[in-house]
Image: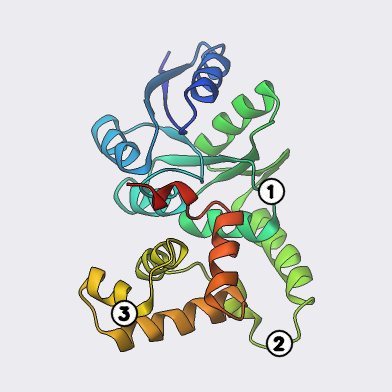
Amino acid sequence: MTQLKVLIVDDHPVFRQGICDVVETDPTITVVGQAADGEVAMELAFDLNPDVILMDINLPTINGLQVTRKIKSALSDTKVVVLTGYDDVEQVFHALRAGASAYCPKDVMPESLIEAIHAVRENMYVVGEKKMTYEDMLSWVEEKVGRLAGLHSTDDTEDLFVPLSPREMEILEHVTRGLSNKEIAYKLGISHQTVKNHMTAILRKLRVDDRTQAAVYALRRGWVRLETNKG
């Protein structure tokens, strides 16, 4: 019997081990590796070429959405199941856009998690307890996004759910650390005006009024971590 190779990515060792114990109750699943941060996750993914990655969003070094996007760009056959405590439709959409095939809460029942792992290997999409085909998923997103977009008094709702680019995410991480535009420009080796342009795009995409709101938005969704202020 062909074993299904799973990589677990989460910065909490007890949770990682718990997930490992759960998924290995299925005799067809083997946990081939564990990672506690985004950079190690990418290294292991490229080395081990797992069938499925169980991915937390709130990770040290690089958040799980960015890691998912980078891994999927290189390993298109690897499926990603996002496991997170952040449960809102916007976040689900960001995860799907990044390349994830499933989005499950961290309190998911063991049998449901195992079912999700097998479902994504069959090219299905899973959100919570809902298993969908690609077409079903598109319909689900359209319904949910449309419902959310109706809460905003704007016609260009298309931009509302566009994830930040890697550069914009990088700048937002520095904003969360409290750096000024001038400091960010120096740190990244780009012009002050380029940083200002990126900040304008970030505020527009997140539908917030200022840098502080943007930082809070990112922190509440686990895109960046307060721990990055250390060191």
Q: CA distance from mark 2 to mark 3?
A: 32 Å
At 69% from the left edge and 57% from the top edge, which residue is drawn? 89
Badge nearest the viewer, 1 or 3: 3
Q: Identify the image quadrant of the N terminus.
A: top left
Q: Which residue is mark 2?
A: 154
* Number of the label disc, if any, that sits on residue 87: 1
In this view, 97 is above or below 37: below
Image spot of residue 30 (x, y percent): 43, 17
Few, some or many C-alpha atoms within 10 Å of disc 2 (few <14, some 14-19, many ≥20)?
few
Q: Secondary structure at mark 1?
A: loop
Q: Amino acid at mark 1?
A: Asp
Image spot of residue 115 (x, y percent): 63, 28
Q: Secondary structure at mark 2?
A: loop
Q: Secondary structure at mark 3?
A: helix
In this view, 204 is above or below 45: below
Residue 8 location, quadrant: top left
The colour scheme applied to this rendered structure is: rainbow
Q: In the visual, does 152 lie left or right of 201? A: right
Image spot of residue 93 (x, y percent): 60, 59
